[in-house]
Image (cartoon, grey):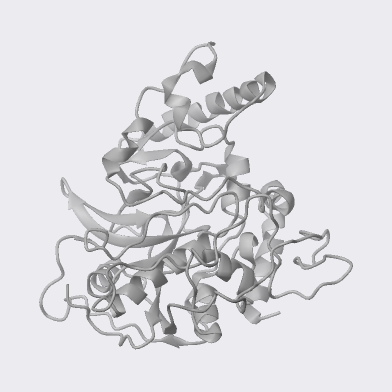
Amino acid sequence: MSASSAHIVHSLVICYAVAISAVCSAAATGLISGEARDEDAGLGDPAASDHLSGDHPTGEDDIFDSAAVAVLMRKYDTHEERMRASATIRENIAIIDQLNADPEDDAEYGISPFADVSPKEFVRDRFPFVFDPVEGRRGAHLVAADVDPSCDGHGCPVSMDWRKKGAVTPVKDQSSCGSCWAESAVSNMESQWFLAHRTSMKAPEVLSVQQVIECDTHDNACYGGFPKGAYQYAIESGGLTSEGAYPYKVKGHSICLANQTFNETCGDGICDDPPLTNFCDEKCSQRAPGHAPIAKFSSWVALPNDESAMAAYVAQHGPVSVGIDASGGIVGVLFPWLQFYKRGIANPKHCTSTINHGVVIVGYGEEEGKKYWIVRNSWSQKFGEAGYFRLLRGAGKCGIASMATSAVAASQAVAQIVV
């Protein structure tokens, strides 16, 4: 097992000992199942998520009679399932009301596609791993980041949105798999490969996340990992193939871990006590016909823990991978602000610097005097502002500056990209 893989397993063991131990142990059976990937999700306009608006349901009537719950990702076939979901939604409404009551937070929270999922279950499925930002910023193939806060003497633009420049692929859906680290890294690599070769490309290629979670020996598939491990895998394996050639397939499947050797105790899964899994059916097939790499990378960079420098790098070089605290919490109580995010500039009171979710900064801006990051999520276009959310910039919110990294495409010098 590699050093970073050992670190991941160690982090998972620690996870059992903290307040969310029940969440982590439940991950053994819950991570590998999930909804189908949203292949039709695109950039869209934030207004496309207006169907998330509306007052949330109140009273004792069947909550499913409300139009507000039409956005839910899950479907329920029996009365008992609907009643359990209704109870969960009503409990979540109390959290939503607390989020909306914060005068310092301008974002709107409400009945989201995940409003029928308890915070405990949501964290189990989406955030199985706690990142160590120090570990996430070091490793093989790391080179110094060329960051000029003055944007090479020409001044950074007041705003930047790489979606508008055609450098970002459609939003994906990780489903109930803790693969946010891979989604974040692959999204970054898609943009970096395109920006390095855009004279010969009309649009960025959608690259394979499945290849990374099945074949990356540095990380642990749906059990968590670091974006830097995905970069290292892409460098060492000769690159990534396309999503079309190697599609995302986690629904009803268990991903075999590339860094483990099969044994009778834990199969191809992480050996632990008890074992996290003893069965898997999806193994690495990077050498299969049709899986030839179409995007190659030479190194990766770790950015300074400074949001001004990060903005300069984004303006000069394109989207970057970052980690955030998406679950939040106070005194051991989960407070998953991102689960219920709908729109606006988020400034969640109860998010911390504990990193548990990988996302991608695709730009930044300012609205009514408030600076913000434009952040791409991996929960389908139905989430938030057409798959994106905005987070307050300049205050180190939710640890966003602690683990900013980016791949460097082959034949791409770490220098300014003229925009």
Image coordinates of residue 138 in percent, x first then y, are 50, 81
Q: Examine the rendering and report whether any part of residue 22 can be seen.
A: yes
Q: Residue at x 57, y 69 (%)?
A: 211
Image coordinates of residue 151 in percent, x first then y, are 17, 76
Image coordinates of residue 112 in percent, x first then y, are 45, 35
Location of the C terminus (image quadrant): bottom left
Image coordinates of residue 204 in percent, x first then y, are 34, 68
Q: Quadrant of residue 162?
A: bottom left
Q: Examine the rendering and report whether any part of residue 101 can be seen.
A: no
Residue 135 horizontal side relative to residue 269, left or right:
left
Location of the N terminus (image quadrant): bottom right
Front-most of residues 210 and 132: 210
Q: Is residue 255 above or below residue 155?
A: above
Q: Residue at x 45, y 63 (%)?
A: 184
Q: Residue at x 42, y 65 (%)?
A: 206
Q: Is residue 83 above or below residue 311?
A: above
Q: Is residue 369 above or below residue 167?
A: above
Query: Farthest right residue?
Result: 264
Residue 385 horizontal side relative to residue 182, left or right:
left
Query: Farthest front residue?
Result: 289
Front-most of residues 49 and 288: 288
Q: Is residue 22 above or below residue 375?
A: above
Q: Residue at x 22, y 78 (%)?
A: 417
Q: How many marks?
A: 0
Query: Farthest left residue?
Result: 154
Front-most of residues 305 and 48: 48
